[in-house]
Amino acid sequence: MFALLKFGFIQNTILAGSIVAIATAVLGYFLVVRGLTFAGHALASIGFAGAAGAVLIGAAPVYGMLVFTVGASLVISLLGREVRERDIAIGVIMTFALGLGILFLSLYHGYAEQAYSILFGSIVGISRSDVLRSGLLSLGVLAAIAVMARPLLFASFDPDLAEARGVPVHALGSVFLVVVALTISIAVQVIGVLLVFALLVGPAATAARLTYRPGRAIAIAILLGLAYTWLGILLASISPWPVSFFIAVLSFGVYLPVRLLVRPRGRRAAHPHGPAGLAPGLPLEEQRHA
Amino acid sequence: MTEPSVLLEQISVRLEGRPILQDVSLSINEGEFIVILGPNGAGKTTFLKLLLGLVRPSSGRIEVLCRTPERGQQAIGYAPQHRALDADLALRARDLVGFGLDGHRWGISWPNRSRQDKIDQALAEVDALELADVPIGQLSGGEQQRLLIAQALLTDPCLLLLDEPLANLDLTHQQEAVALVERVCRTRSVTVLLVAHDINPLLSVTDRVIYIARGHTAIGKPEEVITSRSLSQLYGSPVEVVHTQDRYFVLGAEV
Protein backbone atom coordinates (compact mmCIF):
# COMPACT_ATOMS: atom_id res chain seq x y z
CA MET A 1 0.00 0.00 0.00
CA PHE A 2 2.82 2.39 0.87
CA ALA A 3 4.32 1.78 -2.53
CA LEU A 4 1.24 3.46 -3.92
CA LEU A 5 2.13 6.68 -2.20
CA LYS A 6 5.16 7.04 -4.44
CA PHE A 7 2.92 7.84 -7.36
CA GLY A 8 2.50 11.58 -7.67
CA PHE A 9 -1.15 11.36 -8.66
CA ILE A 10 -2.01 9.35 -5.59
CA GLN A 11 -0.29 11.90 -3.37
CA ASN A 12 -2.28 14.66 -5.04
CA THR A 13 -5.49 12.72 -4.65
CA ILE A 14 -4.87 12.04 -0.98
CA LEU A 15 -4.01 15.69 -0.33
CA ALA A 16 -7.02 17.01 -2.24
CA GLY A 17 -9.26 14.34 -0.71
CA SER A 18 -8.19 15.24 2.81
CA ILE A 19 -8.77 18.94 2.18
CA VAL A 20 -12.20 18.16 0.76
CA ALA A 21 -13.07 15.81 3.63
CA ILE A 22 -12.33 18.46 6.25
CA ALA A 23 -14.17 21.29 4.52
CA THR A 24 -17.24 19.19 3.69
CA ALA A 25 -17.46 17.73 7.22
CA VAL A 26 -17.51 21.18 8.83
CA LEU A 27 -19.96 22.61 6.31
CA GLY A 28 -22.07 19.48 6.51
CA TYR A 29 -22.67 19.95 10.21
CA PHE A 30 -24.20 23.36 9.60
CA LEU A 31 -26.22 22.02 6.65
CA VAL A 32 -27.65 19.30 8.87
CA VAL A 33 -28.43 21.71 11.72
CA ARG A 34 -30.01 24.23 9.36
CA GLY A 35 -32.07 21.58 7.55
CA LEU A 36 -30.39 22.54 4.28
CA THR A 37 -29.05 19.17 3.16
CA PHE A 38 -31.19 19.23 0.02
CA ALA A 39 -29.55 22.50 -1.00
CA GLY A 40 -26.17 20.77 -0.69
CA HIS A 41 -27.21 18.06 -3.12
CA ALA A 42 -28.90 20.50 -5.49
CA LEU A 43 -25.95 22.89 -5.64
CA ALA A 44 -23.73 20.01 -6.74
CA SER A 45 -26.10 19.13 -9.58
CA ILE A 46 -26.24 22.79 -10.54
CA GLY A 47 -22.45 22.84 -10.53
CA PHE A 48 -22.51 20.04 -13.07
CA ALA A 49 -24.17 22.34 -15.60
CA GLY A 50 -21.51 24.95 -14.93
CA ALA A 51 -18.72 22.42 -15.36
CA ALA A 52 -20.25 21.12 -18.60
CA GLY A 53 -20.55 24.69 -19.87
CA ALA A 54 -16.92 25.37 -19.01
CA VAL A 55 -15.79 22.23 -20.82
CA LEU A 56 -17.82 23.33 -23.86
CA ILE A 57 -16.02 26.67 -24.09
CA GLY A 58 -12.67 25.09 -23.28
CA ALA A 59 -12.23 26.40 -19.72
CA ALA A 60 -11.37 24.44 -16.58
CA PRO A 61 -14.56 22.80 -15.23
CA VAL A 62 -13.99 24.12 -11.71
CA TYR A 63 -14.50 27.71 -12.88
CA GLY A 64 -17.82 26.86 -14.48
CA MET A 65 -18.85 25.14 -11.27
CA LEU A 66 -17.92 28.14 -9.18
CA VAL A 67 -19.92 30.52 -11.38
CA PHE A 68 -23.02 28.31 -11.45
CA THR A 69 -23.06 27.23 -7.80
CA VAL A 70 -22.37 30.69 -6.39
CA GLY A 71 -24.93 32.23 -8.76
CA ALA A 72 -27.53 29.61 -7.84
CA SER A 73 -26.94 30.02 -4.11
CA LEU A 74 -27.60 33.75 -4.44
CA VAL A 75 -30.80 33.14 -6.41
CA ILE A 76 -31.94 30.52 -3.87
CA SER A 77 -31.49 32.83 -0.91
CA LEU A 78 -33.30 35.58 -2.81
CA LEU A 79 -36.27 33.42 -3.78
CA GLY A 80 -36.94 31.33 -0.73
CA ARG A 81 -36.82 32.69 2.77
CA GLU A 82 -39.19 30.19 4.31
CA VAL A 83 -38.01 26.59 4.46
CA ARG A 84 -40.87 25.19 2.39
CA GLU A 85 -40.61 27.89 -0.23
CA ARG A 86 -36.87 27.47 -0.29
CA ASP A 87 -36.92 23.75 -1.10
CA ILE A 88 -39.28 24.38 -4.00
CA ALA A 89 -37.04 27.18 -5.30
CA ILE A 90 -34.02 24.90 -5.00
CA GLY A 91 -35.74 22.06 -6.85
CA VAL A 92 -36.87 24.32 -9.71
CA ILE A 93 -33.43 25.89 -10.13
CA MET A 94 -31.78 22.47 -9.97
CA THR A 95 -33.89 20.98 -12.76
CA PHE A 96 -33.30 24.04 -14.93
CA ALA A 97 -29.55 23.74 -14.39
CA LEU A 98 -29.58 20.00 -15.11
CA GLY A 99 -31.41 20.74 -18.35
CA LEU A 100 -28.68 23.20 -19.31
CA GLY A 101 -26.02 20.66 -18.36
CA ILE A 102 -27.52 18.04 -20.64
CA LEU A 103 -27.68 20.58 -23.47
CA PHE A 104 -24.02 21.53 -22.98
CA LEU A 105 -23.00 17.87 -22.99
CA SER A 106 -24.88 17.17 -26.20
CA LEU A 107 -23.26 20.20 -27.87
CA TYR A 108 -19.82 19.04 -26.81
CA HIS A 109 -18.23 16.63 -29.22
CA GLY A 110 -14.94 16.10 -27.47
CA TYR A 111 -13.68 13.46 -25.18
CA ALA A 112 -16.40 12.30 -22.78
CA GLU A 113 -13.89 11.42 -20.06
CA GLN A 114 -14.02 14.92 -18.60
CA ALA A 115 -17.79 14.91 -18.22
CA TYR A 116 -17.56 11.47 -16.69
CA SER A 117 -15.09 12.59 -14.06
CA ILE A 118 -17.27 15.59 -13.17
CA LEU A 119 -20.17 13.27 -12.51
CA PHE A 120 -18.32 10.60 -10.58
CA GLY A 121 -15.09 12.16 -9.40
CA SER A 122 -11.67 10.92 -10.30
CA ILE A 123 -8.47 9.93 -8.59
CA VAL A 124 -6.25 10.43 -11.58
CA GLY A 125 -7.15 13.86 -12.87
CA ILE A 126 -5.85 15.91 -9.94
CA SER A 127 -2.76 18.04 -10.45
CA ARG A 128 -0.56 19.86 -7.95
CA SER A 129 -2.16 23.16 -8.92
CA ASP A 130 -5.61 21.64 -8.30
CA VAL A 131 -4.45 20.66 -4.83
CA LEU A 132 -3.12 24.13 -4.18
CA ARG A 133 -6.33 25.77 -5.37
CA SER A 134 -8.47 23.40 -3.28
CA GLY A 135 -6.30 24.09 -0.25
CA LEU A 136 -6.61 27.84 -0.57
CA LEU A 137 -10.36 27.74 -1.19
CA SER A 138 -10.83 25.39 1.76
CA LEU A 139 -8.86 27.65 4.05
CA GLY A 140 -11.12 30.51 2.98
CA VAL A 141 -14.21 28.38 3.58
CA LEU A 142 -13.04 27.27 7.03
CA ALA A 143 -12.11 30.83 8.01
CA ALA A 144 -15.52 32.09 6.92
CA ILE A 145 -17.24 29.34 8.92
CA ALA A 146 -15.11 30.07 11.99
CA VAL A 147 -16.24 33.69 11.88
CA MET A 148 -19.92 32.84 11.29
CA ALA A 149 -20.17 29.72 13.48
CA ARG A 150 -21.91 31.05 16.57
CA PRO A 151 -24.46 33.43 15.03
CA LEU A 152 -25.10 30.83 12.32
CA LEU A 153 -26.02 28.21 14.94
CA PHE A 154 -28.09 30.79 16.79
CA ALA A 155 -29.98 31.75 13.65
CA SER A 156 -30.52 28.08 12.78
CA PHE A 157 -32.07 27.45 16.16
CA ASP A 158 -34.36 30.48 16.31
CA PRO A 159 -34.19 33.10 13.57
CA ASP A 160 -36.60 35.48 15.34
CA LEU A 161 -34.63 35.50 18.52
CA ALA A 162 -31.34 35.82 16.67
CA GLU A 163 -32.66 38.76 14.70
CA ALA A 164 -33.83 40.47 17.87
CA ARG A 165 -30.34 40.07 19.26
CA GLY A 166 -28.88 41.79 16.22
CA VAL A 167 -27.80 38.84 14.07
CA PRO A 168 -28.20 39.75 10.37
CA VAL A 169 -30.12 36.52 9.80
CA HIS A 170 -30.90 36.84 6.09
CA ALA A 171 -27.48 38.11 5.06
CA LEU A 172 -25.87 35.36 7.09
CA GLY A 173 -28.03 32.72 5.40
CA SER A 174 -27.02 34.01 1.96
CA VAL A 175 -23.31 34.13 2.79
CA PHE A 176 -23.55 30.62 4.20
CA LEU A 177 -25.05 29.29 0.96
CA VAL A 178 -22.26 30.92 -1.04
CA VAL A 179 -19.73 29.20 1.23
CA VAL A 180 -21.56 25.91 0.60
CA ALA A 181 -21.30 26.58 -3.14
CA LEU A 182 -17.54 27.12 -2.88
CA THR A 183 -17.08 23.95 -0.85
CA ILE A 184 -19.05 21.87 -3.31
CA SER A 185 -17.02 23.18 -6.22
CA ILE A 186 -13.89 21.95 -4.47
CA ALA A 187 -15.39 18.65 -3.37
CA VAL A 188 -16.67 17.64 -6.79
CA GLN A 189 -13.12 17.10 -8.10
CA VAL A 190 -12.69 14.09 -5.85
CA ILE A 191 -16.14 12.77 -5.20
CA GLY A 192 -18.05 13.91 -8.26
CA VAL A 193 -21.36 15.71 -8.62
CA LEU A 194 -23.65 12.79 -8.02
CA LEU A 195 -22.14 11.62 -4.76
CA VAL A 196 -21.21 14.86 -3.03
CA PHE A 197 -23.88 14.03 -0.51
CA ALA A 198 -21.74 11.13 0.74
CA LEU A 199 -19.05 13.46 2.07
CA LEU A 200 -21.10 16.57 2.69
CA VAL A 201 -23.93 15.06 4.69
CA GLY A 202 -22.91 11.51 5.58
CA PRO A 203 -20.19 12.23 8.16
CA ALA A 204 -22.03 15.21 9.69
CA ALA A 205 -25.36 13.39 9.94
CA THR A 206 -23.64 10.43 11.60
CA ALA A 207 -21.75 12.69 14.00
CA ALA A 208 -24.90 14.57 14.96
CA ARG A 209 -26.41 11.27 16.10
CA LEU A 210 -23.40 10.44 18.21
CA THR A 211 -23.11 13.65 20.22
CA TYR A 212 -25.12 16.75 20.99
CA ARG A 213 -22.13 19.01 21.48
CA PRO A 214 -21.56 21.13 18.38
CA GLY A 215 -17.77 21.15 18.78
CA ARG A 216 -17.52 17.41 19.23
CA ALA A 217 -19.96 16.72 16.40
CA ILE A 218 -17.79 18.72 14.01
CA ALA A 219 -14.65 16.94 15.20
CA ILE A 220 -16.25 13.51 14.73
CA ALA A 221 -17.54 14.53 11.30
CA ILE A 222 -14.00 15.51 10.24
CA LEU A 223 -12.56 12.20 11.44
CA LEU A 224 -15.27 10.21 9.66
CA GLY A 225 -14.85 12.24 6.48
CA LEU A 226 -11.08 11.70 6.47
CA ALA A 227 -11.48 7.99 7.17
CA TYR A 228 -14.00 7.51 4.33
CA THR A 229 -11.83 9.46 1.92
CA TRP A 230 -8.55 7.70 2.72
CA LEU A 231 -10.13 4.27 2.69
CA GLY A 232 -12.03 5.13 -0.48
CA ILE A 233 -8.88 6.24 -2.28
CA LEU A 234 -6.97 3.17 -1.08
CA LEU A 235 -9.68 0.77 -2.25
CA ALA A 236 -10.10 2.57 -5.56
CA SER A 237 -6.38 2.47 -6.24
CA ILE A 238 -6.20 -1.30 -5.82
CA SER A 239 -9.42 -2.07 -7.66
CA PRO A 240 -10.99 -1.02 -10.94
CA TRP A 241 -13.96 0.61 -9.19
CA PRO A 242 -14.32 4.39 -8.80
CA VAL A 243 -13.34 6.20 -5.60
CA SER A 244 -16.74 7.87 -5.20
CA PHE A 245 -18.38 4.45 -5.07
CA PHE A 246 -16.25 3.41 -2.10
CA ILE A 247 -16.75 6.70 -0.28
CA ALA A 248 -20.51 6.51 -0.78
CA VAL A 249 -20.60 2.91 0.45
CA LEU A 250 -18.55 3.74 3.55
CA SER A 251 -20.66 6.80 4.27
CA PHE A 252 -23.88 4.84 4.00
CA GLY A 253 -22.46 1.77 5.71
CA VAL A 254 -21.56 3.75 8.82
CA TYR A 255 -24.61 6.00 8.89
CA LEU A 256 -27.13 3.18 8.68
CA PRO A 257 -26.14 1.20 11.79
CA VAL A 258 -25.59 4.41 13.75
CA ARG A 259 -29.03 5.65 12.77
CA LEU A 260 -30.65 2.34 13.64
CA LEU A 261 -28.73 1.31 16.71
CA VAL A 262 -27.61 4.45 18.51
CA ARG A 263 -30.54 5.87 20.37
CA PRO A 264 -30.32 9.58 20.90
CA ARG A 265 -28.69 9.75 24.30
CA GLY A 266 -31.74 9.91 26.46
CA ARG A 267 -32.29 11.86 29.60
CA ARG A 268 -32.19 8.68 31.57
CA ALA A 269 -28.54 8.07 30.88
CA ALA A 270 -27.67 11.64 31.65
CA HIS A 271 -29.74 11.98 34.81
CA PRO A 272 -30.36 8.72 36.54
CA HIS A 273 -32.08 10.46 39.44
CA GLY A 274 -34.04 13.05 37.49
CA PRO A 275 -37.79 12.87 37.04
CA ALA A 276 -37.33 11.34 33.60
CA GLY A 277 -34.91 8.80 34.99
CA LEU A 278 -37.66 6.56 36.23
CA ALA A 279 -37.10 3.04 35.11
CA PRO A 280 -39.54 1.89 32.43
CA GLY A 281 -41.81 -0.98 33.20
CA LEU A 282 -42.44 -0.30 36.87
CA PRO A 283 -45.59 1.45 37.99
CA LEU A 284 -44.86 5.04 39.01
CA GLU A 285 -45.84 4.51 42.61
CA GLU A 286 -43.35 1.70 43.16
CA GLN A 287 -40.56 3.71 41.63
CA ARG A 288 -41.20 6.62 43.90
CA HIS A 289 -40.84 4.34 46.89
CA ALA A 290 -37.81 2.59 45.53
CA MET B 1 -40.08 60.76 38.20
CA THR B 2 -37.85 58.58 36.02
CA GLU B 3 -38.19 58.30 32.26
CA PRO B 4 -40.74 55.71 31.14
CA SER B 5 -39.29 52.39 29.93
CA VAL B 6 -41.60 52.35 26.96
CA LEU B 7 -43.26 55.34 25.35
CA LEU B 8 -45.57 55.16 22.34
CA GLU B 9 -47.17 58.22 20.79
CA GLN B 10 -49.80 57.70 18.11
CA ILE B 11 -48.05 54.62 16.78
CA SER B 12 -49.50 52.82 13.77
CA VAL B 13 -48.10 49.63 12.30
CA ARG B 14 -48.92 48.13 8.91
CA LEU B 15 -47.65 44.74 7.79
CA GLU B 16 -47.87 44.01 4.07
CA GLY B 17 -50.37 46.82 3.74
CA ARG B 18 -52.63 45.46 6.47
CA PRO B 19 -53.12 47.71 9.48
CA ILE B 20 -52.09 45.88 12.66
CA LEU B 21 -51.97 48.65 15.23
CA GLN B 22 -53.69 52.00 14.88
CA ASP B 23 -52.91 55.16 16.74
CA VAL B 24 -51.61 53.55 19.91
CA SER B 25 -50.36 55.83 22.67
CA LEU B 26 -49.16 54.51 25.99
CA SER B 27 -46.39 54.78 28.50
CA ILE B 28 -44.92 52.09 30.73
CA ASN B 29 -42.87 52.90 33.80
CA GLU B 30 -39.65 51.34 34.94
CA GLY B 31 -40.20 48.21 36.99
CA GLU B 32 -43.82 47.74 35.97
CA PHE B 33 -45.25 44.28 35.37
CA ILE B 34 -47.53 44.45 32.34
CA VAL B 35 -49.59 41.64 30.90
CA ILE B 36 -50.57 41.90 27.23
CA LEU B 37 -53.88 40.26 26.36
CA GLY B 38 -56.04 39.97 23.29
CA PRO B 39 -57.42 37.55 20.72
CA ASN B 40 -55.18 35.55 18.38
CA GLY B 41 -53.78 37.61 15.55
CA ALA B 42 -54.62 40.89 17.26
CA GLY B 43 -51.02 42.04 17.12
CA LYS B 44 -49.56 41.05 20.49
CA THR B 45 -46.41 39.57 18.98
CA THR B 46 -46.16 42.49 16.56
CA PHE B 47 -46.33 44.81 19.56
CA LEU B 48 -43.29 43.07 21.10
CA LYS B 49 -41.46 43.11 17.76
CA LEU B 50 -42.12 46.84 17.54
CA LEU B 51 -40.35 47.32 20.87
CA LEU B 52 -37.47 45.12 19.67
CA GLY B 53 -36.99 47.15 16.51
CA LEU B 54 -37.90 44.17 14.31
CA VAL B 55 -41.01 45.93 13.04
CA ARG B 56 -41.02 49.61 12.09
CA PRO B 57 -44.03 51.81 12.79
CA SER B 58 -45.65 53.42 9.76
CA SER B 59 -46.24 56.54 11.80
CA GLY B 60 -45.88 57.86 15.32
CA ARG B 61 -43.07 58.13 17.81
CA ILE B 62 -41.65 55.30 19.89
CA GLU B 63 -38.99 55.24 22.56
CA VAL B 64 -37.81 52.13 24.39
CA LEU B 65 -35.35 52.71 27.23
CA CYS B 66 -35.02 56.31 26.01
CA ARG B 67 -34.08 55.50 22.42
CA THR B 68 -35.58 54.49 19.13
CA PRO B 69 -35.71 50.70 19.20
CA GLU B 70 -33.14 48.88 17.16
CA ARG B 71 -32.25 45.21 17.05
CA GLY B 72 -29.39 43.86 19.10
CA GLN B 73 -29.97 45.73 22.35
CA GLN B 74 -28.43 43.95 25.32
CA ALA B 75 -30.75 45.82 27.68
CA ILE B 76 -33.79 43.98 26.32
CA GLY B 77 -34.32 40.32 27.13
CA TYR B 78 -36.67 38.52 24.72
CA ALA B 79 -38.20 35.08 24.87
CA PRO B 80 -40.11 34.42 21.62
CA GLN B 81 -43.20 32.32 21.39
CA HIS B 82 -42.24 28.70 21.71
CA ARG B 83 -42.40 26.55 18.60
CA ALA B 84 -41.96 22.83 18.23
CA LEU B 85 -38.34 21.84 17.79
CA ASP B 86 -36.93 19.00 15.78
CA ALA B 87 -36.43 16.09 18.18
CA ASP B 88 -33.03 15.38 16.66
CA LEU B 89 -31.78 18.94 17.06
CA ALA B 90 -28.12 18.47 17.97
CA LEU B 91 -27.86 21.15 20.64
CA ARG B 92 -27.95 20.94 24.42
CA ALA B 93 -30.03 23.07 26.75
CA ARG B 94 -26.82 24.77 27.81
CA ASP B 95 -26.10 25.77 24.19
CA LEU B 96 -29.54 27.31 23.81
CA VAL B 97 -29.21 29.38 26.97
CA GLY B 98 -25.69 30.38 25.95
CA PHE B 99 -27.10 32.01 22.80
CA GLY B 100 -28.67 34.58 25.09
CA LEU B 101 -25.23 35.54 26.29
CA ASP B 102 -23.15 35.71 23.14
CA GLY B 103 -25.06 34.06 20.28
CA HIS B 104 -24.92 37.26 18.26
CA ARG B 105 -21.14 37.57 18.47
CA TRP B 106 -18.93 36.45 15.60
CA GLY B 107 -16.54 33.60 16.06
CA ILE B 108 -16.57 30.31 17.89
CA SER B 109 -17.48 29.90 21.54
CA TRP B 110 -14.63 28.24 23.40
CA PRO B 111 -15.39 26.60 26.71
CA ASN B 112 -14.72 29.10 29.45
CA ARG B 113 -15.34 29.02 33.17
CA SER B 114 -17.06 32.36 33.67
CA ARG B 115 -19.32 31.80 30.65
CA GLN B 116 -20.17 28.35 32.01
CA ASP B 117 -20.95 29.80 35.44
CA LYS B 118 -23.25 32.46 34.03
CA ILE B 119 -25.15 29.85 32.04
CA ASP B 120 -25.42 27.56 35.08
CA GLN B 121 -26.69 30.45 37.15
CA ALA B 122 -29.37 31.30 34.60
CA LEU B 123 -30.37 27.64 34.40
CA ALA B 124 -30.58 27.46 38.19
CA GLU B 125 -32.75 30.55 38.21
CA VAL B 126 -35.41 28.79 36.15
CA ASP B 127 -34.90 25.53 38.03
CA ALA B 128 -33.47 23.78 34.98
CA LEU B 129 -29.92 23.04 36.05
CA GLU B 130 -30.50 19.31 35.77
CA LEU B 131 -31.47 19.78 32.11
CA ALA B 132 -28.19 21.48 31.17
CA ASP B 133 -26.76 18.67 29.08
CA VAL B 134 -29.97 17.24 27.68
CA PRO B 135 -30.53 17.74 23.94
CA ILE B 136 -33.21 20.36 23.56
CA GLY B 137 -35.21 18.31 21.09
CA GLN B 138 -35.92 15.84 23.89
CA LEU B 139 -37.28 18.40 26.34
CA SER B 140 -40.97 19.03 26.86
CA GLY B 141 -42.53 22.26 25.64
CA GLY B 142 -42.62 23.58 29.17
CA GLU B 143 -38.96 22.82 29.78
CA GLN B 144 -37.99 24.50 26.53
CA GLN B 145 -40.06 27.48 27.60
CA ARG B 146 -38.15 27.77 30.85
CA LEU B 147 -34.88 27.70 28.90
CA LEU B 148 -36.12 30.53 26.71
CA ILE B 149 -36.78 32.59 29.83
CA ALA B 150 -33.32 31.72 31.20
CA GLN B 151 -31.83 32.81 27.91
CA ALA B 152 -33.67 36.14 28.10
CA LEU B 153 -32.34 36.82 31.61
CA LEU B 154 -28.69 36.24 30.78
CA THR B 155 -27.70 39.75 29.77
CA ASP B 156 -29.21 41.31 32.90
CA PRO B 157 -31.85 43.18 30.92
CA CYS B 158 -33.76 46.29 32.06
CA LEU B 159 -36.74 45.27 29.96
CA LEU B 160 -38.04 41.74 29.61
CA LEU B 161 -40.35 40.84 26.71
CA LEU B 162 -41.96 37.41 27.07
CA ASP B 163 -44.22 36.06 24.33
CA GLU B 164 -46.69 33.53 25.78
CA PRO B 165 -44.26 32.07 28.31
CA LEU B 166 -47.07 30.22 30.10
CA ALA B 167 -48.53 28.59 27.00
CA ASN B 168 -46.92 25.16 27.34
CA LEU B 169 -46.81 24.94 31.12
CA ASP B 170 -48.99 22.96 33.46
CA LEU B 171 -50.48 24.75 36.46
CA THR B 172 -47.57 24.10 38.82
CA HIS B 173 -45.01 25.26 36.31
CA GLN B 174 -47.17 28.24 35.41
CA GLN B 175 -47.10 29.33 39.04
CA GLU B 176 -43.35 28.78 39.19
CA ALA B 177 -42.75 30.77 36.04
CA VAL B 178 -44.96 33.61 37.24
CA ALA B 179 -43.15 33.66 40.59
CA LEU B 180 -39.80 33.69 38.82
CA VAL B 181 -40.69 36.57 36.51
CA GLU B 182 -42.19 38.50 39.39
CA ARG B 183 -39.05 38.03 41.46
CA VAL B 184 -36.90 39.31 38.60
CA CYS B 185 -39.26 42.22 38.09
CA ARG B 186 -39.40 43.28 41.73
CA THR B 187 -35.86 42.60 42.94
CA ARG B 188 -34.01 43.92 39.90
CA SER B 189 -36.59 46.52 39.02
CA VAL B 190 -36.90 45.06 35.53
CA THR B 191 -39.82 46.19 33.41
CA VAL B 192 -41.77 43.14 32.25
CA LEU B 193 -44.14 42.88 29.29
CA LEU B 194 -45.66 39.42 29.18
CA VAL B 195 -48.04 38.20 26.49
CA ALA B 196 -50.64 35.79 27.85
CA HIS B 197 -53.94 34.21 26.95
CA ASP B 198 -55.37 34.17 30.43
CA ILE B 199 -55.00 36.92 33.01
CA ASN B 200 -55.99 34.77 35.98
CA PRO B 201 -52.64 33.14 36.84
CA LEU B 202 -51.08 36.60 36.61
CA LEU B 203 -53.67 38.63 38.52
CA SER B 204 -51.72 38.77 41.74
CA VAL B 205 -48.51 40.02 40.12
CA THR B 206 -49.54 42.30 37.30
CA ASP B 207 -49.58 46.08 37.73
CA ARG B 208 -51.47 46.89 34.57
CA VAL B 209 -52.73 45.10 31.48
CA ILE B 210 -52.66 46.08 27.82
CA TYR B 211 -55.59 44.68 25.89
CA ILE B 212 -55.14 44.57 22.12
CA ALA B 213 -58.08 43.96 19.77
CA ARG B 214 -58.90 45.14 16.25
CA GLY B 215 -55.69 47.21 16.11
CA HIS B 216 -56.63 49.25 19.15
CA THR B 217 -55.36 49.03 22.68
CA ALA B 218 -56.64 49.70 26.17
CA ILE B 219 -54.24 50.02 29.09
CA GLY B 220 -54.96 50.17 32.78
CA LYS B 221 -55.40 48.14 35.94
CA PRO B 222 -57.12 44.80 35.33
CA GLU B 223 -60.29 45.94 37.08
CA GLU B 224 -60.44 49.01 34.81
CA VAL B 225 -59.71 47.31 31.49
CA ILE B 226 -61.28 43.88 31.88
CA THR B 227 -64.84 45.09 32.21
CA SER B 228 -67.85 44.48 30.00
CA ARG B 229 -67.94 48.13 29.02
CA SER B 230 -64.31 48.63 28.16
CA LEU B 231 -63.92 45.37 26.25
CA SER B 232 -67.21 45.83 24.34
CA GLN B 233 -65.88 49.19 23.22
CA LEU B 234 -62.53 47.68 22.21
CA TYR B 235 -64.03 44.73 20.31
CA GLY B 236 -66.82 46.81 18.83
CA SER B 237 -69.30 44.13 19.80
CA PRO B 238 -70.96 43.10 23.05
CA VAL B 239 -68.58 41.35 25.42
CA GLU B 240 -69.51 40.19 28.87
CA VAL B 241 -66.95 39.99 31.67
CA VAL B 242 -67.71 37.92 34.71
CA HIS B 243 -65.56 38.84 37.69
CA THR B 244 -65.99 36.33 40.47
CA GLN B 245 -63.84 34.91 43.26
CA ASP B 246 -60.96 37.06 42.06
CA ARG B 247 -61.01 35.51 38.61
CA TYR B 248 -62.02 37.02 35.28
CA PHE B 249 -63.98 35.26 32.60
CA VAL B 250 -64.51 36.97 29.28
CA LEU B 251 -67.60 35.77 27.43
CA GLY B 252 -68.96 36.49 23.98
CA ALA B 253 -65.59 37.17 22.39
CA GLU B 254 -62.71 35.13 21.11
CA VAL B 255 -60.09 35.88 23.74
Image (cartoon, rainbow, N blue to C red):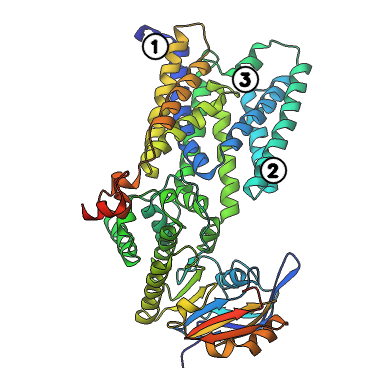
Marks 2 and 1 close (CB-CB < 8 Å): no
- Examine the image and state in which quarter residue B189 appears: bottom left
Q: In the image, what residue type sits under mark 1?
A: Leu
Name which residue lies at 49% across and 87% down: B3
Could you tell which of marks 3 and 1 lies nearer the N-terminus?
1
Residue highlighted by disc 2: A75
The residue indicated by pointer 3 is A119
Q: In whole angstroms, how far apart are the C-alphas of marks 3 and 1? A: 25 Å
Q: Nearer the viewer, residue B72 or A63?
A: B72
x and y percentages locating residue B202 in the rendered image: 46, 78
SS label for mark 1: helix
Taking the spot 45% from the left edge, 22% from the top edge, the residue there is: A253
Badge nearest the viewer, 3 or 1: 3
* For residue A116, above or below residue A279: above
Q: Quadrant of the image for the N terminus of chain A? A: top left
Q: Position of residue A100 (x, y in %)?
A: 75, 27
Quarter residue B124 falls in: bottom left
Please tell me how crowded label 1 is: few (under 14), some (14-19), or many (20+) other residues with Cα within 10 Å. few
Query: Which chain does tag 3 point to?
Result: A
Tag 2 subunit: A
Residue marked by disc 1: A5
Residue A89 image label:
none
Between the C-alphas of marks 3 and 2, the distance is 23 Å
Q: Are marks 3 and 1 in contact (CB under 8 Å)?
A: no
Point 58% across, 18% down: residue = A120
